[in-house]
Image (cartoon, helix red, strand yellow):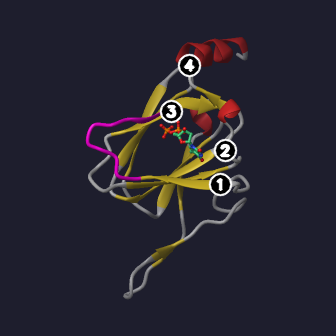
Amino acid sequence: MTLEEVKLINLPKMLDDRGNLSFLEENDHIPFEIKRCYWIYDVPGGEIRGGHSYKINQEFIIALSGSFDVVLDDGRQMKKYSLNRSYYGLYVPNGIWRHIENFSTNSLGFIVSSVSFDENDYVRDHEQFISTKLKNQ
Ligand code: TYD
């Protein structure tokens, strides 16, 4: 996988004087079946989350509240996406190294995943990530 496969996806937005509503459905707005959701919150200023890639897991990352930056690396190039709205998100396929930084106060990151939690699906060593990428080129 490369950064070419990464994409920002706009979600439906039901504008309403009572307050807006957005939603997502598997295999429709996002290109995978949903196995898990998790969220990141109460991040102290200056902290960085992530710093790994997944062998199989694909993710869709939304800044439900506040803002943060998702920094991606496919072994060849790096790209930073700033997320700051609840009606779009970032699709990140498997095989991309990523970390999340620059969390605003009270930000809430919501992540939809294609696999159940499995520590064996993580690549947490960046050198190992790079050497696997080089082998697969
Ligand atoms: P981790 O994915 O390493 O966090 P981040 O990438 O944001 O820094 O997860 C932190 C801890 O939480 C780790 O011990 C694994 C555990 N965890 C679960 O048990 N289930 C989950 O769905 C997730 C995402 C993490």
Residue 122 x/y as whole percent:
63, 31
Question: In which of the image's four quarters is ligand 1 placed?
Answer: top right
Q: Nearer the viewer, mark 3 or mark 1?
A: 1
Secondary structure category for the residue under label 1? strand
Residue 121 x/y as whole percent:
69, 33
> Where is 35 relative to 59, above or below?
below
Residue placed at 57% from the left, 32% from the top?
Answer: 3
Q: Nearer the viewer, mark 3 or mark 2?
A: 2
* Contact between labelled residues 3 and 4, with CB atoms less than 8 Å apart: no
- Whether the residue carrying mark 2 lies under 8 Å from ligand 1 is answered with yes
The disc labelled 2 sits on which kind of residue?
Phe
Q: Earlier in the sequence, mark 4 or mark 3?
A: 3
Question: Is residue 48 rendered magenta in the image?
Answer: yes
Which image quarter: residue 112?
bottom right
Q: Which mark is residue 117?
A: 2
Measure the alpha-carbon separation of dots 4 and 1.
24 Å
> Where is 93 relative to 136, above or below?
below
* Contact between labelled residues 1 and 3, with CB atoms less than 8 Å apart: no
Look at the image and tell me whether residue 96 can be seen. no
* Contact between labelled residues 2 and 1, with CB atoms less than 8 Å apart: yes
Q: Is residue 113 left or right of residue 111?
A: right
Q: Which residue is mark 4?
A: 125
The disc labelled 3 sits on which kind of residue?
Arg
Look at the image and tell me whether residue 53 can be seen. yes
Q: Which residue is mark 3?
A: 98
